[in-house]
Amino acid sequence: MKKRLVVQGRLSDAQLAELRDLFEVAVLPKTTALDAPENRALLAEAHGIIGSGLAITPQLLDAAPNLNVIATISVGYDNIPVDELTKRGIMLCNTPDVLTETTADTGFALIMTTARRVVELAEWVKADKWQASIGPALFGSDIHGKTLGMVGFGRIGQAVARRGALGFGMRVLYSNASPKPDLESELGAQRRELNALLAEADFVCVTVPLTAETEHLIGTQEFAQMKPSGIFINIARGKVVDERALIHALENGVIHAAGLDVFEQEPLPASSPLPRMANVVALPHIGSATHETRDAMAQRAVDNIRLALQGERPISLVNKEVYP
């Protein structure tokens, strides 16, 4: 008898066909919650769950006693209790690697648009305010030759740093990571304690994962250590930053500007001042949002769950101790 899958999220017709050749597949409507009462019968028989934005709770796991694997179409798994899955012997798979370069593109786009005030001045032109040559009040900041401070130096952080060092001649500092001698040689990168990095960098770019240790890693004290001309970029997770402290720093000239793809609450509440601030570029969490990358992420999730349910090791297994 074929094993059973529950799908919630975007898969292409070809990806669904690949899964249906091997498994019994139930596709939930996009508007249906995974743990909705009408899905209880499906969960009770499911051996695997694949999807994006999965909200997994112990109660949902109780309703899925046959579950072997969850494949999330994302790198992050903030809403999934990994320890609980491990305790129950359920594998969790994610999709690193395939979105590294695309997310780094987004990070560097934020550096460029924020420094050169691209969004602000494009709106200024649209508002028919360009009546003469612009003056110093509308000038931006150079990027080439400046110092880029990477808070976190994993795959994405390294990819952003390569763009800065090799493309723009930037001096690269990094913190919150183990020593990277190969990258120090390749990029001229230098390791710093966080407070020293904040004080030296012209651009501070955050790429650390969200953990108990990194929640609100950047707050009032850290913004105060940055240069008044400093530009802050966050492409990690919103909760890595104390958003109230960030707003205060931007409103009071503690730092110059910010480029943000992630926020503590998403979508942003209407009460947030961030999208209306001239010195902020705010994006709707588009780090990996290209057709090519989202398709590659979905395919990685398909490959992960296929391998797991066929008794093979998935490509991207989070809780490795579960694999026999």
Image (cartoon, rainbow, N blue to C red):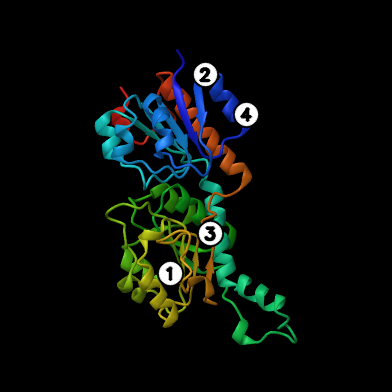
The residue indicated by pointer 4 is: 14
* Contact between labelled residues 2 and 1, with CB atoms less than 8 Å apart: no
Q: Is residue 84 left or right of residue 132?
A: left
Identify the mark at residue 284; answer none if there is no mark. Answer: 3
| Crowding near the residue tagged with mark 3, few <14, some 14–19, many ≥20 C-alpha atoms within 10 Å | few
Disc with the residue nearer the chain's start (1 vs 3): 1
Whether residue 249 is situated above or below residue 23 in the rendered picture: below
Instruction: Indicate the quadrant where residue 236 lies.
Output: bottom left
Q: Residue at x 62, y 70 (%)?
A: 119
Looking at the rendered image, the disc whose residue lies closer to the viewer, 4 or 1, is 4
Where does the N terminus fall, quadrant-wise? top left
Q: Which residue is mark 2?
A: 22
Residue type, numbered disc 3: Pro
Q: Which residue is mark 1?
A: 201
In the displayed structure, 228 sits above or below 210; it is below
The earlier-in-sequence mark between 4 and 2 is 4
Q: CA distance from mark 1 to mark 3?
A: 26 Å
* Residue 246 x %, y %: 40, 72
- Which comes before the other along the chain, label 4 or label 3? 4
| Residue situated in front as seen by the camera: 145 or 293 | 293
Could you tell me how far apart the alpha carbons at marks 4 and 3 are, in whole angstroms? 28 Å
Q: Residue 55, position in %: x, y?
A: 39, 44
> Residue at 26% of width from left, 30% of height from top?
88
Q: Please tell me which of labels 2 and 3 falls first in the chain.
A: 2
